[in-house]
């Protein structure tokens, strides 16, 4: 599957308001609270061609959450959940199963 280029059907072109919204969110950070997720199984998914949530952001997020697992999906953009649905679904299924098993193990 080829990655859509700006202006092509399926691309991530957005109306100008989206950029204003993104700029308004920029000052917010939850970074100081991410360590609190240490006991929460966390999967961070990034897409290699995501121009909105770039892979380096996912890597920084995963690094800030103790025990987080980072997976970067090749040949996908911001629409990774659509572009690579079978891969994403398999990753989520495995993550949820592992989290359930870990929870059950601690309650036995």
Image: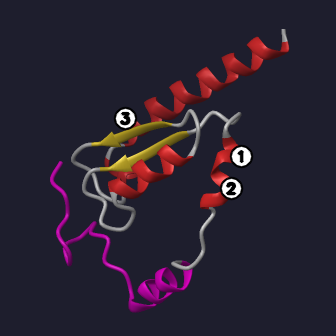
Residue at the location (75% across, 12% down)?
105
Q: Are marks 1 and 2 in contact (CB under 8 Å)?
A: yes
> Which is closer to the viewer, label 1 or label 3?
1
**Residue 15 highlighted magenta (yes or no):** yes
Q: Secondary structure at mark 2?
A: helix
Residue 58 rendering spot, x and y as whole percentages = 42, 52
Quote the CA–CA distance across marks 1 and 2: 6 Å
Q: Please rate how many residues cluster around mark 2, counting C-alpha atoms within 10 Å: few if below 14, some from 14 to 19, many from 20.
A: few
Q: Are marks 3 and 2 in contact (CB under 8 Å)?
A: no
The stretch in magenta equals 1-25
Residue 87 rendering spot, x and y as whole percentages = 37, 35
Q: Is residue 55 left or right of residue 89?
A: left
Quote the CA–CA distance across marks 3 and 2: 29 Å
Residue at the location (21% across, 47% down)?
75
Please identify the residue farthest to the right as the structure is shown.
107
Quote the CA–CA distance across marks 1 and 3: 28 Å
Q: Secondary structure at mark 3?
A: helix
Position of the C terminus, as image quadrant, is: top right
Q: Give the number of the disc on residue 87.
A: 3
Q: Is residue 76 left or right of residue 105?
A: left
Q: Give the number of the disc on residue 68.
A: none
| Residue bearing the label numbered 1 | 36
Q: Earlier in the sequence, mark 1 or mark 3?
A: 1
**Residue 102 highlighted magenta (yes or no):** no
| Residue bearing the label numbered 2 | 33
Q: Please rate how many residues cluster around mark 3, counting C-alpha atoms within 10 Å: few if below 14, some from 14 to 19, many from 20.
A: some
């Amino acid at each position: 599957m080829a990655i859509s280029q700006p202006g092509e059907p399926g691309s991530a072109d957005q109306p100008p308001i989206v950029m204003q919204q993104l700029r308004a969110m920029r000052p917010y950070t939850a970074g100081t609270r991410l360590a609190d997720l240490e006991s929460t199984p966390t999967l961070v998914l990034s897409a290699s061609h995501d121009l909105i949530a770039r892979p380096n952001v996912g890597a920084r997020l995963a690094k800030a959450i103790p025990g987080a697992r980072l997976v970067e999906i090749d040949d996908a953009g911001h629409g990774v959940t659509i572009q690579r649905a079978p891969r994403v679904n398999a990753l989520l299924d495995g993550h949820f199963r592992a989290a359930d098993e870990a929870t059950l193990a601690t309650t036995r």
